[in-house]
């Protein structure tokens, strides 16, 4: 009975660390980045300010994934035990791609209204594609790894 209670306590503590630690860490790292590069945070181009804005979340989420990897290694587990290495089934991929296509297709209609060429949705100029991939991979992989087990 004591091991069940201890297991629950560990689960609650780990949930609190992830649930409260990630947002608090993002806020702290974002503040450190904006304080260490004040000129770019205030007078930088929109692209630079956006990159500085997302960088805190990207750094923190990847850091938490690395810490989780070390914790899993000390316990003799791996990401595969959490279900990360599975690629999913074909029906799941088809459903996900259909929802993505529906979302992209419905949002394409807004680009001409904002005087943005529709081609920018597929081949954006500048660093926008890099930023979108950075955000997408971070949100898709890191958040799934960190929050799916709980």
Image: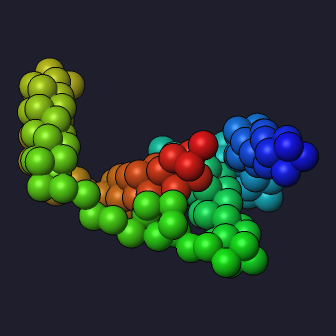
Q: Which residue is drawn at 51% across and 60% down?
A: 82
- Left or right? Give the position of 42 relative to 32: left
Q: Is residue 79 above or below residue 31?
A: below
Residue 86 visible in the displayed image? yes
Q: In this view, does 96 lie above or below 112?
A: below
Percent across and percent down for residue 72 are 67, 70
Q: Give the number of marks.
A: 0
For the C terminus, the image quarter is top right
- Left or right? Give the position of 14 relative to 109: right
Q: Give the farthest residue toward the front.
A: 1
Q: Is residue 109 above or below residue 137?
A: above
Q: Which residue is drawn at 30% across and 58% down?
A: 129
**Which is nearer the eye, 102 or 70?**
70
Percent across and percent down for residue 6 are 87, 47
Q: Residue at x 85, y 51 (%)?
A: 3
**Which is nearer the eye, 99 or 16?**
16
For the N terminus, the image quarter is top right
Q: Is residue 12 above or below residue 138?
A: above
Percent across and percent down for residue 16 are 78, 39
**Which is nearer the eye, 75 or 145?**
75
Q: Which quadrant of the structure image shows residue 121?
A: top left
- Left or right? Give the position of 59 relative to 7: left
Residue 120 visible in the displayed image? no
Q: Residue at x 67, y 43 (%)?
A: 42
- Left or right? Give the position of 120 relative to 137: left
């Amino acid at each position: 009975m004591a091991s069940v209670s201890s297991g629950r306590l560990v689960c609650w503590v780990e949930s609190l660390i992830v649930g409260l630690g990630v947002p608090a860490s993002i806020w702290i790292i974002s503040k450190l980045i904006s304080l260490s590069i004040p000129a770019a945070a205030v007078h930088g181009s929109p692209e630079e300010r956006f990159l500085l804005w997302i960088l805190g979340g990207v750094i923190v989420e990847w850091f938490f994934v690395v810490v989780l990897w070390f914790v899993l290694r000390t316990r003799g587990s791996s990401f595969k035990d959490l279900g990360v290495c599975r690629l999913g089934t074909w029906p799941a991929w088809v459903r996900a791609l259909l929802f993505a296509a529906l979302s992209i297709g419905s949002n394409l209609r807004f680009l001409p209204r904002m005087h943005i060429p529709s081609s920018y949705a597929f081949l954006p100029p500048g660093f926008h594609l890099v930023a979108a991939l950075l955000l997408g991979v971070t949100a898709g992989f890191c958040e799934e790894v960190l929050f799916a087990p709980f």
